[in-house]
């Protein structure tokens, strides 16, 4: 297939593009290489892709409607995976307009381009952060998500609502994927697994928020990519069953939402211990209060994903962390 991947220089996007190329798909990567975190890491990810047969790249922003429309017109994608977004919960407190520009304006541009190009299936990144103030665990796609606690989360819920509108009005098949704390080689430097690794490698103290009483559904990158590919290959269809409207994750329109998480939450202090074991050193922990916009726990119910795709993530955290640390040592020479 011809697959357009936005955010192709990002953590998940680069891994996904490589996987699609390896199975024989033609991939157009689209990314603006913004400096939210080190653009060199993004360029290094792309270097692993550019020489590969079947990969092309466009350097542009989602907000640039003309550039996006040209990319669609030139490449004529059959399917689209939208991973580009302004990421980060805490950064949304500092620069909220960046989230409106990328996550809302950019996403409507993607939806319009998909509609105009008669795309067969749009898969897009949502986030576990949409569960917000919800305390019922595990988080299920059947649960209401009406109480976001960060603007980032609010834009991701908005994406799900916008996608449903296009599925309903224009019969555009859309699938939203709520990712849970993704980690692994080539990961994002702004996320806690990477931040912890950096400090442990340097022998520096670690800031642990909520006094270490967090738990997270850490999900290894290969498991995330497998979930994306499984759903990409299964476009939802319209169904004449009003019962589907009782769930926020299904519809009579060709629309679905899934969690992709390990379904095995790990206490933050345990995750740090595994990192320390892999690096072979212990560091001091500075226990601090919870940060604004954060949530105490995440825990994915992946039954809907398992039911519809016969797949659920399975990589144990010990195995995933060892692979991440091996990459980190090699990449940074530590």
Image (cartoon, grey):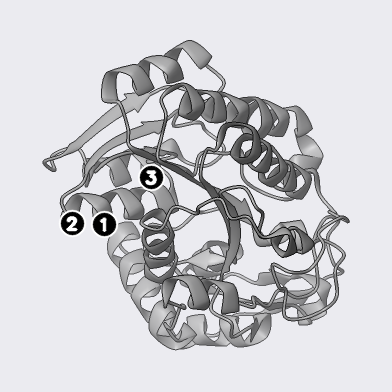
Q: Which residue is mark 1?
A: 19
Q: Position of residue 92 (x, y in %)?
A: 75, 41
Q: Position of residue 96 (x, y in %)?
A: 77, 33
**3D distance between C-alphas at marks 2 and 1:** 6 Å
Residue visible at 39% across and 85% down in the picture: 319
Q: Position of residue 322 (x, y in %)?
A: 38, 80
Sequence order check: which comes first, mark 2 or mark 3? Answer: 2
Residue visible at 58% across and 73% down in the picture: 304
Q: Between residues 183 and 25, which one lies in front from this camera angle? A: 25
Residue at the extreme front of the image, as rendered: 240
Residue visible at 55% across and 24% down in the picture: 112
Q: Which residue is mark 2?
A: 23
Q: Which residue is mark 3?
A: 41
Q: In the picture, which quadrant includes the N terminus? A: top left
Q: Between residues 53 and 301, which one lies in front from this camera angle? A: 301
Q: Position of residue 97 (x, y in %)?
A: 75, 27
**3D distance between C-alphas at marks 1 and 3:** 19 Å
Residue visible at 33% across and 55% down in the picture: 15
Query: Element type at marker 2?
Result: loop
Give yes or no for contact between labels 2 and 1 (Cβ–Cβ under 8 Å). Answer: yes
Which dot, 1 or 3, sits closer to the camera?
1
**Horizontal side of residue 50 vs 208, given as left or right:** left
Is residue 280 visible in the rendered image? The answer is no
**Horizontal side of residue 198 vs 161, given as left or right:** left
**Horizontal side of residue 133 vs 206, given as left or right:** right
Q: Between residues 52 and 307, which one lies in front from this camera angle? A: 307
Give yes or no for contact between labels 2 and 3 (Cβ–Cβ under 8 Å). Answer: no
**Horizontal side of residue 92 vs 43, given as left or right:** right
């Amino acid at each position: 297939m011809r697959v357009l991947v936005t955010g192709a220089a990002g953590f998940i996007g680069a891994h996904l593009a490589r996987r699609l190329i390896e199975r024989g798909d033609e991939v157009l990567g689209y990314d603006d290489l913004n400096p939210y975190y080190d653009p060199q890491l993004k360029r290094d990810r792309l270097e692993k892709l550019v020489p590969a047969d079947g990969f092309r790249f466009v350097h542009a922003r989602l907000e640039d409607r003309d550039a996006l429309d040209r990319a669609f017109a030139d490449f004529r994608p059959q399917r689209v995976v939208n991973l580009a977004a302004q990421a980060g919960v805490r950064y949304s407190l500092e620069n909220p307009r960046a989230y409106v520009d990328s996550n809302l304006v950019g996403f409507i541009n993607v939806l319009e381009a998909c509609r105009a190009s008669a795309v067969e299936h749009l898969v897009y990144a949502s986030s576990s952060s949409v569960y917000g103030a919800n305390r019922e665990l595990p988080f299920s796609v059947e649960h209401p998500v009406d109480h976001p606690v960060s603007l980032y989360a609010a834009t991701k819920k908005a994406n799900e609502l916008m996608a449903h509108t296009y599925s309903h009005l224009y019969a555009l098949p859309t699938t939203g994927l709520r990712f849970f704390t993704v980690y692994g080689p080539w990961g994002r430097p702004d996320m806690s697994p990477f931040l912890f690794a950096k400090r442990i490698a340097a022998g520096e103290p670690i800031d642990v928020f909520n006094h270490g009483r967090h738990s997270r559904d850490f999900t290894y990158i290969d498991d995330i990519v497998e979930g994306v590919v499984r759903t990409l290959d299964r476009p939802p269809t319209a169904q004449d069953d009003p019962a589907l409207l009782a769930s926020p994750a299904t519809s009579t329109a060709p629309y679905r939402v899934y969690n992709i998480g390990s379904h095995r939450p790990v206490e933050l202090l345990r995750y740090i211990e595994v990192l320390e074991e892999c690096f072979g050193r212990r560091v001091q922990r500075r226990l601090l209060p919870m940060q604004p916009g954060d949530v105490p726990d995440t825990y994915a119910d992946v039954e809907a994903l398992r039911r519809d795709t016969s797949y659920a993530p399975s990589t144990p955290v010990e195995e995933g962390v060892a692979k991440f640390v091996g990459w980190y040592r090699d990449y940074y020479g530590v």
